Image (spheres, coloured by chain):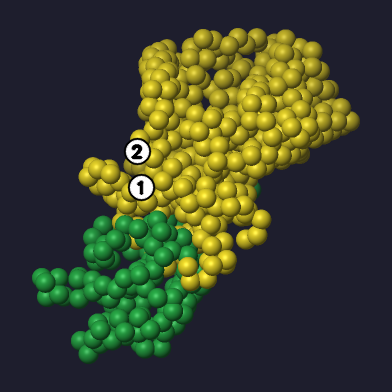
Amino acid sequence: MPGVSVARDRAASAAGARVAGIAFHPAWKRRWLLAFAICCALVLMLLVALLALFYEGVGLWGNNIPVTWALDIVGYDWWIGIGCGGLMVSAWLGLSEPGLRAPLDRLAQTIALMAAIGAAIYPIIHLGRPWFFYWNIPYPNRLDLWPQFRSPLVWDAMAILGFLTTAFCLWTTGLLPDLALLRDRADSRWRQVIYGVAALGWRGSAGQWARWRHAQLIFAVCGLLIVVSLQSGAAVMFAGTAEPGWHDALLPVFFLMVAIYSGVAAIALIALLVRAVFDLRDLISARHVASLGLLLLTTGLATTYCYMMSFFATALGGDRYELDVLGRRGTGPYAWSLWIVFACALLPIHLLWSGPLRRSPVALAFVSLLALIGLWMDRFMILVITLHRDFLPSSEHPYAVSLWALATFFGIAGFVGALLLLALRYLPVMAIGEFREGRLRLRAAEVPGE
Amino acid sequence: MSERRAPLFAVAATYPAGVDLVPVVRALQRADFGRIDVFGPVPMPEVSALIGVRHAAVGWIGLGGALFGLAGFFFMCCWATLVDYPFLIGGRPAFSWPYFVIPSLSFGVMCGAAATLFAFLFLARLPRLNHPVFNIEGFERATQDRAFVTVEPKGDDVEPEQIAEVLRRTAPLPLALERVPR
């Protein structure tokens, strides 16, 4: 593999030791503990919010008739969007060379799984009686009742289950060789036992590697399928209602693009945070930062295109209700949500046309954070502006965000953050095997028989 | 030497990771001593092709699982709405097949991923914490900077010394040779 510098080769040779060092003896224990404590406090807040919710009902969130889908579905769509983007980016990275893939792939997969767990909480707690969540799933029962297969609710249940299964399989099997490395580098008996059991006794035989590779590839293909199915399914679910503003034929692509954009933004933000906090500047190199910048710019532009096209198509061919929704997005009582989308998600990415800004971690992290905020507002705009006023003036009703809904959102953010922190602290933060593969191939090519 | 008296699992040779082990595997295959396996910190596509690893089975089982899940869920939807509990709702036709496709696809992917996982674990013989290769001296470096070749003699007539002789004669030369007890 030409073009790999000596410095990078040396960095790669130390990668295993570095990643094991992060898991065993982090230099930033205090910062980690502080962040983990904040996340745990948010999880406590979530528990209180959930108790209040189960006691009071979903009206506590400010949901009303007609705004039955508010921050709960906004939160669900946002988290699952990040999850879908993570899985999609991981599948894309599978096509790239190991040197580019290794430091980002594990992060993308971890973010995908944890964000999907965060998303999966919402549809359950949004049910009036969450303890009956399994009624969504067909199971043998003596009442001879079935879920309504002609309703999109079943789609959601199956899509989430499929997504979680795929992301879990991809993530856990991907971890096996790296867990085995931690087992073999462990400096205490209990670490050896815990990582040894977690690695399932990975031996690194030629057969195991070949099947592992193949399985990883298949999981990536499953990931692509489930991402497209989940996001376009969600869009068709919107189109399945009578509500105005949700019937554009572009909507499935629109949802998919927004999801990938938010996933790329989340990966960029967390990769840059990890890079700064763990001091991984040699592993997540300037080249990775620049690649993330390009990916963010590309997905951001594609999202902008979807926005413009959906406005254009509505203006060109929408009926009066569709046009009314479009007008209210720009000027109505919730118009601020659209302008936040523009200000945070669609305009700042144009900063990334500039090479120096694209390669600057601080600028990239800032643009990613803005994009995540903007894309949250995108979901809010799509849901609330349509729902609060449909066809009849009599069914119009204002919606106000309640503190409980915000507490639930930030509580779930804390929960996802805690999971991420645990994974970053105790698991290998990057695929060491893949990093090493590039180096060994290079060495074998240069010095046969060394 | 109690290890010598323990039943023999294999003869193991240690190499630096990253060397081309294809000549070694070929030499051992020509001598036909028994089952050959190679261990190392990175995937070894050439070696695994040479020793005849049929990794595609993982994919076929995964595809089978996915198709089973897809068809199974679709027919379950049909059976529930057409046969077991026909129910007129919103004037929708009972056989609303486009509605059945999306959850069937999700369920198919889920079954495919699960089948792939189980196929991978079964074919890679995982989890197994007590494999005899862990008896090789320094095997913990197999995940770091060493590669190992093991030959399991196929009968009592194959002497470990014969295997060691072939390994000693073949380039690249091993860093160490060892009889591995079972």
Asked which secondary structure carries label 2, the reply is helix
Between A303 and A111, the one lying in front of the other is: A111
Residue placed most toward the observer, A13 or A78:
A13
Q: Are marks 1 and 2 in contact (CB under 8 Å)?
A: yes
Q: Secondary structure at mark 1?
A: helix
Q: In this structure image, what is the colour of chain B?
A: green
Mark 2 residue crowding within 10 angstroms, few (<14) / some (14–19) / many (20+): some
* In front of the other: A145 or A407: A407
Say which label, 1 or 2, has the lower sequence index. 2
Disc 2 residue type (three-letter): Phe
The chain holding disc 1 is A
| Coordinates of residue A5 in the picture (x, y in percent) | 62, 52
Q: Is residue B71 left or right of residue A292?
A: left
Image x and y of residue A405, in percent: 51, 15
Image side of residue B63 versus residue A34, left or right: right
Identify the residue at horizontal 38%, vertical 27% (top origin): A29
Observer able to see residue A266 = no
Question: On the image, numbered disc 1 is attached to which residue?
Answer: A182
Residue B34 drawn above or below residue A139: below
Quadrant hosting residue B164: bottom left
The amino acid beneath tag 1 is Leu
Residue A339: give its label: none
At 31% from the left and 71% from the top, the residue drawn is B176
Point 27% across, 47% down: residue = A192
The quarter of the picture where the C terminus of chain B appears is: bottom left
Q: Is residue B91 left or right of residue A191?
A: right
**Residue wearing tag 2:** A24
Residue A374, image x, y percentages: 67, 23
- In this rendering, is residue B39 above or below A411? below
